[in-house]
Image: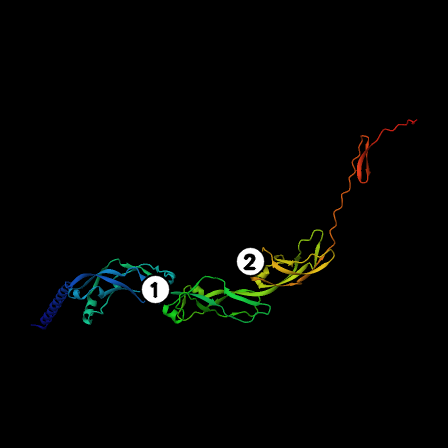
């Protein structure tokens, strides 16, 4: 046999061997497929990698899963061999918890779709060889329902700012207080372990947050200023905008109101009263914005009760200042009348008011009927007039 024929013979044998191996592989594969069975299990649904500052509830505790597993392993596998795992960090539906997690109650995220990628083997009750074999062999056919709703609630505590100040106000001013310009509730979120570590295990207790220092140097009026709050370790603001808030710094100062008239009591009939001086000066203290809105007519200065002096006499009398009844209560509670200068006035009784004059009698009108009028002793009466003649009496 020539070398050429020998090479052809070898190539043919190799082809036949490869074909035989391929046929054997196909037969083995078919045989292996025939060595499986379909089984349905009720598998628990669990979630892992839950953030420590979130409480989670799943609306479904289990799901029905149909699997294809080797027949010879059927008696070694049950529902406890598998579980559906949801990874909090990998589910896109659970991103940005601040948009769906509740604060006071559990709120739902969008439904998380479950597929065979969520199905995991729990092999702690199987030996190593069987668990490896099962892990390589099982296939998921279907998951009933196919989705689960995740509900979440942030673990929170209320917080209250504590404002820190530095610097000294002018001597004429006094710091009343520093308060928040906006009074909405500030919430912090963290794990229960963190809150307990910082001494805030009690949910009803507010966490005190110190602010950056507010400089009062050379400030003479109330003002508002944004300040940052210092967070304790491992805590976050539920609302990130709360990290910086507006502080309302209330400063008390003084003001003087001149020419406030003294109100005298109603005069006794026939007697007129006058005071010297007729006006006084008031010194008041309070928040500068309230003082700027006041005017002299917002005050009433009255004398204390006194005995009305006789005509021409003078009596020294103390005076007190009050707010007019139309001034808002918020102003009267925040502003203080410090002094009245002078606090004593002299009340004088002027000359008595003259008595009204007696009415003078009105003369009657002239008459043309032969009767004329005459007055005697302030009384009017009529006198008849006779016709006179030129005849001489006998």
Lateral position of residue 143 relative to residue 101, left or right: left
Residue 53, image x and y in percent? Answer: 36, 66
* Figure quadrant of residue 235: bottom left
Looking at the image, do the residues carrying marks 1 and 2 touch, with CB atoms under 8 Å apart? Answer: no
Between residue 104 and residue 39, name the one nearer to us. Answer: 104
| Residue lying farthest to the left in this orientation | 1
Between residue 20 and residue 324, name the one nearer to us. Answer: 324
Q: Which mark is residue 329?
A: 2
Residue 14, image x and y in percent? Answer: 12, 69
Residue 289, image x and y in percent? Answer: 57, 61
Is residue 153 visible to us here?
yes
Q: Residues within 10 Å of mark 2 (few under 14, many from 20)?
A: few
Is residue 247 visible to us here?
no
Residue picked out by circle 1 = 55
* Quadrant position of the N terminus in the picture: bottom left
Between residue 39 and residue 326, name the one nearer to us. Answer: 326
* Figure quadrant of residue 46: bottom left
Q: Residue at x 18, y 71 (%)?
A: 129
Q: Disc 1 versus disc 2: distance between alpha carbons?
A: 47 Å
Secondary structure under tag 1 reads strand
* Figure quadrant of residue 223: bottom right
Secondary structure under tag 2 reads helix
* Quadrant position of the C terminus in the picture: top right
Q: Residues within 10 Å of mark 1 (few under 14, many from 20)?
A: some
Between residue 15 and residue 340, name the one nearer to us. Answer: 340
In this rendering, the label closer to the viewer, 1 or 2 = 2
Lateral position of residue 206 relative to residue 121, left or right: right
Count of picture labels: 2
């Amino acid at each position: 046999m020539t070398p050429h024929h020998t090479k052809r013979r070898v190539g043919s044998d190799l082809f036949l061997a490869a074909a035989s191996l391929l046929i054997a592989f196909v037969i083995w594969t078919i045989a292996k497929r025939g060595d499986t069975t379909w089984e349905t299990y009720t598998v628990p649904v669990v979630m892992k990698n839950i953030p420590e500052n979130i409480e989670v509830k799943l609306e479904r505790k289990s799901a029905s899963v149909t699997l294809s597993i080797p027949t010879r392993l059927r008696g070694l596998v049950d529902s406890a061999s598998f579980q559906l795992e949801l990874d909090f960090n990998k589910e896109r539906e659970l991103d940005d918890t601040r948009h769906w997690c509740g604060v006071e109650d559990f709120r739902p995220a969008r439904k998380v779709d479950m597929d065979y990628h969520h199905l995991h083997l729990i092999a702690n009750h199987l030996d190593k060889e069987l668990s490896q074999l099962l892990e390589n062999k099982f296939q998921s056919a279907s998951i009933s329902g196919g989705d689960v709703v995740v509900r979440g609630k942030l673990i929170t505590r209320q917080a209250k700012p504590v404002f820190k100040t530095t610097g000294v106000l002018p001597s004429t001013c006094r710091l009343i207080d520093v308060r928040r310009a906006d009074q909405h509730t500030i919430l912090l979120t963290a794990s229960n372990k963190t809150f307990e570590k910082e001494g805030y295990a009690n949910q009803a207790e507010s966490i005190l947050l110190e602010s950056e220092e507010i400089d009062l140097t050379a400030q003479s009026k109330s003002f508002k200023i944004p300040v940052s709050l210092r967070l304790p370790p491992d805590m976050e603001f539920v609302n990130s905008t709360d990290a910086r808030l507006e502080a309302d710094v209330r400063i008390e100062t003084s003001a003087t109101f001149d020419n406030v008239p003294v109100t005298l009591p109603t005069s006794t009939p026939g007697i007129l009263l006058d005071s010297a001086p007729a006006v006084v000066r008031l010194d008041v203290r309070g928040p500068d914005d309230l003082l700027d809105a006041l005017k002299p007519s917002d005050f009433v200065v009255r004398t204390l009760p006194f005995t009305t002096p006789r005509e021409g006499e003078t009596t020294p009398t103390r005076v007190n200042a009050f707010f007019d009844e139309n001034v808002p209560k918020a102003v009267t509670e925040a502003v203080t009348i410090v002094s009245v200068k002078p606090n004593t006035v002299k009340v004088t009784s002027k000359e008595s008011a003259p008595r009204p004059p007696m009415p003078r009698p009105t003369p009657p009108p002239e008459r043309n009927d032969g009767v004329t009028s005459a007055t005697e002793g302030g009384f009017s009466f009529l006198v008849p007039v006779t016709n006179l003649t030129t005849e001489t009496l006998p």
